[in-house]
Amino acid sequence: MRNRSGISYFFLFGFVLLFAGILLAQNTPDRALIVNGKSEGMVVQMGGHAYVDVETVAQFTNGSVTLEPTRIVLTFPASGTSAAPSTGLAPLPPAPPPGLSRNFASLAIAELAEMREWRGAVGIILTYGVPVVGSWPQDYHDHVEANLMQVGVAAATAADQDAMQLLQNEFSNLSRWANDVVSTRQSLNATNTVRPDTMQSDQSLAKISDCSRFLSSMLVSGSFADDQSCH
């Protein structure tokens, strides 16, 4: 009889210890969940395992949780996509790189070469009084103007746009000078067509030449600059 009582007390004592252990396990204090240095929620420890609320997981992974009658669906964003909240505004385009773009500078340098060729052809009229035969002055103008439009299409940066304005100024000044020379020659006014120093004393031509040299140097440097000769 005493043996049975001892066994009963033994089992009762063991049950108390087991129950106390379960209570201690359940009363283990929660721990804070830190993700990339930011507190994202709490971690519950039970049975030697750590548990995190599924909504907390969805929050710091930019995912979503759907509660259904028989299941819980946790969805993560696809790799390489951004789950930032939409503001209703279209994303801003990437800022263009500073300075002159290589393609624009290359086309602009070629355009300046075409302008110099045109200037040289018209300069022969001033130097030697050559009569204007055919439509070649207008052909030069139209060819250079068409190429200038292509250069404008290639302008991709703010510096390109500023340089394009100077290039257009050079074209306008060159066109005006060339038209004056051709008109003078066609009117048979030899005063400005046979003097040996006509090219050297032409102030408009000097300004055009100075701007051409400046633009060439500026385009090669890759950085925009301004000069009074191009205005």
Image (cartoon, helix red, strand yellow):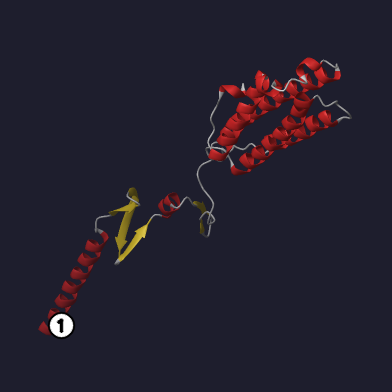
Residue 175 point in image, percent of width and height: 74, 24
Q: Is residue 88 visible?
A: no
Relative height, residue 174 to residue 16 (above, below): above
The residue located at (66%, 19%) in the rendering is: 201
Relative height, residue 182 to residue 152 (above, below): above
Location of residue 207 by image quarter: top right
Residue 62 point in image, percent of width and height: 47, 50
The residue located at (65%, 37%) in the rendering is: 108
Location of residue 6 by image quarter: bottom left
Q: Which residue is mark 1?
A: 4
Residue 12 point in image, percent of width and height: 18, 73
The quarter of the picture where the N terminus appears is: bottom left
Q: Check disc 1 and report its element: helix, strand or loop.
A: helix
Q: Is residue 77 left or right of residue 59?
A: right
Residue 102 point in image, percent of width and height: 59, 43
Q: Is residue 132 left or right of residue 94?
A: right
Dot 1 alpha-carbon crowd within 10 angstroms: few under 14, some 14 to 19, many 20 or more: few
Between 7 and 123, the one lying in front of the other is 123
The quarter of the picture where the C terminus appears is: top right
